[in-house]
Amino acid sequence: MTALLTIEGLGKNFGGLAAVRDLGFTLNAGEIVGLIGPNGAGKSTAFNLISGALPPSTGRIVFAGEDITGRKPSRVVRHGLARTFQSATVYPKSTVEENIYRGALCHFDVPVWAQIAQTAACRDARRRVREEVDKVLEITGLAPLRHEIAGALAYGHQKRIGVAIGLATRPKLLLLDEPAAGLNPEECAEFGRLLKTLRDEHRISLLFVEHHMALVMGTCDKIIVLVHGQKIAQGTAEEIRNSPAVIEAYLGVDEDAHA
Amino acid sequence: MHNASTMQPTTGAKASAQARPATHGGSWKAWIPALLALFAIPPLLAGNPFYVHLAVLICINIIFVNGLSLISRTGQLSFCHAAFMGMGAFAAVICSTRLHTPFAVSMLAGMGVATVAAWLLGAVILRLQGVYFVLVTFCFGELFRLVLLEGGDLTGGANGIANIPPASIFGVALDSKLSFYFLAAACAFASTVLLVALFKTPRGHSLDAVGDNPELAEASGIGIQGSQMFAFLLGSAMAGFAGALLAHYLGFVSPESFSQHVSVAAIIMLVIGGRGSVLGPILGALIMTPLPELFRSAIETQNILYGITLILVLKFLPMGLVGIAARLRGGKGGAR
């Protein structure tokens, strides 16, 4: 297996507070990796560092053979590393289709004069974008809602649109920030199936931060546990369940543990 | 937010949306004749030079506010739009009077200077968002006015520059109000068509994406800074062009023509006409340009009236006059 994402010695300080310290792990192509930890463990900070939303204080992030440390999110995405947001983040006034279309513009590099002149190359590129939108609508099951206004849809649908926008950027790796937060059990199970489909049928690797233990244990190939900004354990669901360090620091005090 | 009708399954409107997915803006067949008809009205009033004068000012304001509307669609509110108009005006006038360049060259120089200045300023301040951007642009606008006042021989100080040669194209001097109107109308038409065309392209759609949700746009590959810089450059170039045109029309420029009041007036026109629509600047300029003339008897209370109008529009018509049309049509207006 080849390493898609390699994190080395990643750290972030906010003033005197070290939110993430010396974090290191690798994610192989085709893997689903979960990042868990109690509140305030630095999961979201780690997530923002990897996606480029925050510049790291120390360390290196290598993605698909290229050092992407400190690059802006819009450039990281074009390299194949997309992210979603914890809350439902959509373009509320636009339709579902337009939301996904805006994500698919990621790789649209026709110069602006050619876009206005509507050259053949531009029309071709636009057709490819439309095809990409249709494909993503199918994958995410949003096709029946394509003409609905995103802001008027239910929370679960909006989170799905968030994932769809990420997918439209044609990622190799998709980072998901608490994809199950605020979803009911049925939506959550459906989400788990979507994640597996993305990996199995569309060769997209996934890294997600999540509190929902059943989803993490059920879908992840590898789990990384953060406490106080440091990695305390890494392994399969089975190994994590039986790790004394994790039980002591995390599962022992979490009400989801016996779920 | 949106009425329940948008939740219903397929209707006629949706079928047409399906045919042209993710494109905004009415069709060219609707835009071009409507604009041509609008610009054809003033020559019919040629008997009254005052109306023609107003029509020229409206055309120049359309170009000016078009620029501001482009910038605002990426989510930034520029309070120094008049400064770029002033840069265009003074650069063009200095070329015309000192270097005796032809009118077209002066216009290009004015636009070029405004664009370069926008690039220099934008590179520094476009990392600011929201109210911070507003404050810095406000300061820059004031700074520019003071520079003009202290500019000595180059800018003529408080007196400005007079005796600007009239515009001429292909050797034809546009020295009458009506002949200048045709030039101004052609330019206003062109700038509007450029915006309509731009907002039909993916580039235009990505500008709107940045305006709607910058964080999401950035996270899905549409750079905030690149988009805002593009809009700031093109918008400021339009302001510079409008300024150069105004200077050659009036035959006179002074620092006070480009003070903060003018920037605020542009914002009022944009808000009243409607942000987020290419039609907004046209409506705004059409309605707000003649008002100072009508309110001339109430010159002291004029600004109070504008303030009240602005508050009322923001409160009851947040999308401006264009919003009424969209609301009447029900749901998503095609006027984008």
Image (cartoon, coloured by chain):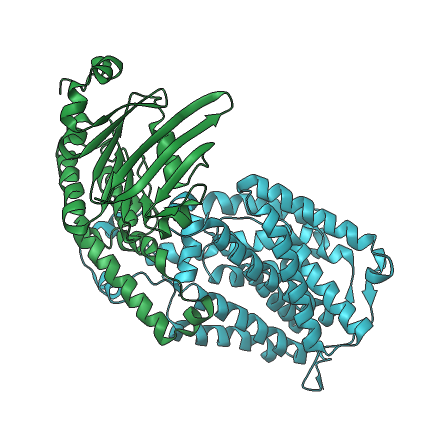
Q: Position of residue B23 (x, y in %)?
A: 34, 63
From the viewer's perspective, is A204 left or right of B113? left
Count the numbered circles shown. Answer: 0
From the viewer's perspective, is A16 left or right of A119? right
> The C terminus of chain B is located in which quarter?
bottom left
Q: What residue sits 47% from the left and 62% below the top?
A: B278
Chain rendered cyan: B
From the viewer's perspective, is B54 left or right of B272? right
Locate residue A228: give its quadrant: top left
From the viewer's perspective, is A29 left or right of B308? left
Rendered position, A130 above or below A137: below
In the figure, the shade used to draw chain A is green
Q: What residue sits 16% from the left and 24% below the top?
A: A239
Rendered position, A181 above or below A104: above
Closer to the camera in the image, B21 or B59: B21
Q: Residue furthest front?
A: A1
User: From this viewpoint, is residue B106 visible?
Assistant: yes
Locate residue B15: give its quadrant: bottom left
Q: What residue sits 75% from the left and 63% below the top?
A: B90
Locate residue B330: give its quadrant: bottom left
